[in-house]
Structure formats: structure tokens, C-alpha cells
Image (cartoon, grey):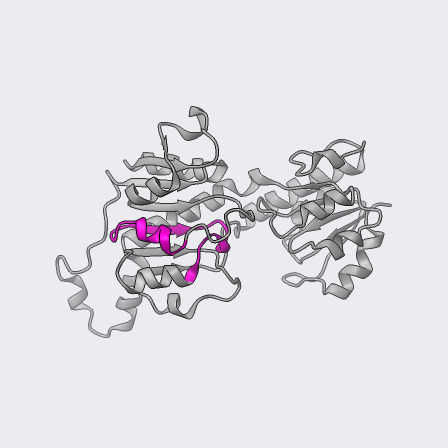
Amino acid sequence: MAKILITHGVPMSGFAMLKPREVICPKPGQAFSQEEMLALLPGCDAVVACGAMNRQRLEACKKARLVVCYGAGYDSIDVAAATELGLPVANIPDSVTETTAQLAMAHMLALTRRVCELDRQIRAQETTGSLFTMGRTMGVLLDGMTLGVVGMGRIGARVAEFGRFIGMRVVYAGRNIKPFSQAGNARRLPLHELLATSDVVTLHCPLTPQNVGMIGAEELALMRPTAFLINTSRGKLVQEAALADALEQGRLAGAALDVFENEPEVSPRLKKLENVILTPHIGSNTLRTRNRMAEQCSERVLDALAGRKPDNLLNPETWKA
């Protein structure tokens, strides 16, 4: 009977379709240690990777037919090493589109209307009358503003739809021109021009060696002092020290981050700033989404075990039916 290893204790109901095959997973909320992983991997026919899969772990996959990433982003999996080893790797990009886009929307609205900042203030003060003074706690109306989407993929396109719905002009930066069905009436701009003209910049691109630290001091200097930066993609896209500098010096109006450069560590400088929203990488963290992720991972695994080519292979050249 086939064995499937799930590397972390994630919600399991979506994996029910793998029965009666043997499913090996740690307790809820926990992860296998390195030693446990290296002992378990050689006997498994497929792996659901909820965390890092480096070369050592991939080399231990002696009989696995597939490693499937529990999510859309796959930068924690050494795909190049897997390709050298002839090990197919797949991801599940469709599962997290809506939930991550909704979080970006929530960040955008909460940041520009100062929701979290004012919530903290009203809780901290015994007498709150001054907070209700007309004109004191004004936020920003997004209608008529420009939304700059960096990375017009599934999530970026969904955020762009939201921006258009509330009356924002949308521009985007990306390697390729996107079809109208994806980009709508958004205009493609070089990154430097997008940064200089946008009122809100939201990042939705994968982490690659080429774009590590793509938003640094030079890029932030291009942005308007009234502009906002949102990152629900990958923390290493942004140089946090440069971001903290810009915020502390009033060269940027605010930022909202769900991901961090040295995650799970969060910059103490960012924690001190009132005009920053920080959430602990919750883009896909709803039960409905996690169950959908488990179902899509299960579909990829079942296809591989049955000799069918799984969807969303990241290294299709390795597939041998």
C-alpha cells in the first residue's frame, strides 16, 4: 500500500480522499524533525511539502513519485535539485488566490483608513473624546487613486479587480504583457515608473533569485511620501531596513506586511511604527482554504500514483508515466 508523507500537522479533513492509503503526518500544529524526515522519506511514495525540502531531503526520497507543495509559492523547495534527481514537483496555485487577495484588500483598506492604529489608540486611552475630534483622525479615500500591482498573476489580477471596483486606476509591472482577460484595463509600466506614479503598491510576485530585495532604498525613494506599500507575497522581496528608514523619515505614508525578510523574526523597528500593519503570514490561513489546499494536493498525489501526469508540474521534464 502506498505511503504519503505530510510534513506538517495541517488540517487533515481535505486529505480524506487519500484513504485507504497510509498517510503519515505529525500532530496538529507540529512538524517532523530533520532526523524524523530523513528516516521517513525513503519509504514514502509521495510527499506533501508544507515546509522546506532541501537537497538532502529530496535525495532521501528514494521511491517518491511526486513532491507536491502545500501552496502556491514553492521557493522553499529546491526544484533545481529535484530536477537533477528526476523527482517531479508540483504546486497548487489556484487554491490560495482568493484568500490571499482578500487579505491584501483588507490590508489596503485597514492601512489607508488607519483602522489598526485607531483601534490601538481607542483601547489605550481612558478618555477618548479627543479621538472623535473632526478632522483629527482622517484616512485616505482610495477612489480615484492609482493602484500599482507588481506581479499580475492570479492573485495580482484579483486584487486589481478589487481596485477597479472601488474606483482606482490600475497599473502593473511584470515580465510579460498580460491578456485583457487577466489585466482588465490595467496599463503595464516599468517598475520604476509604477513606483513613482502609484498611491498604493501591492506585491504579488513569486520569490526568485532575480527579485530578492527588489524593493530597496532606491525603489522606495521613487515612491511618493503619501504612498503605501503592501506585501502579502514573500518577505525577501523587500529590504526591511530600507523600508523602516523610509517610514521613520516620513518618506512613505505606511506599509502593511504579512510576510517578512527573516520570517518568523519581525523587525523591532517596524513593530514600533503606528503606520505599519503586521500579520503573521496568514494569507492562506482560513479553514476553508486549507481544506481546499489539502484536496488539491491529494488530487496531484492520486494522479501521480495512478501514472497520470499531475497538474501544475514545476519540472515537467521529469515526468515519466
Q: Which residues are magenta?
A: 216-240
Residue 12 picture location, percent across and down = 67, 51
- Residue 221, above or below 264: above
* Residue 220 colored in magenta in the image: yes
Residue lying at 27% horizontally and 57% vertically, measured from the top left: 251
* Residue 4 colored in magenta in the image: no
Q: Is residue 244 visible?
A: yes
Residue with the most extreme top position:
180
Query: Where does the C terminus fall, quadrant-wise?
Result: top right
Residue 318 picture location, percent across and down = 75, 37
Residue with the most extreme bottom position:
126
Please identify the quarter of the rendering in which residue 20 is found.
Answer: top right
Residues 46 and 189: in front is: 189
Residue 11 picture location, percent across and down = 63, 53
Residue with the most extreme right position:
1
- Residue 221, above or below 117: above
Please identify the quarter of the rendering in which residue 313 is found.
Answer: top right
Residue lying at 54% horizontally and 48% vertically, measured from the top left: 207
Query: Where does the N terminus fall, quadrant-wise?
Result: top right
Left or right: 51 as drawn, with respect to 275: right
Residue with the most extreme front position:
218
Left or right: 79 as drawn, with respect to 305: left
Residue 70 picture location, percent across and down = 63, 48
Residue lying at 40% horizontally and 39% vertically, measured from the top left: 159
Residue lying at 41% horizontally and 30% vertically, measured from the top left: 183
Residues 317 and 301: in front is: 317
Left or right: 51 as drawn, with respect to 160: right
Q: Is residue 18 visible?
A: no
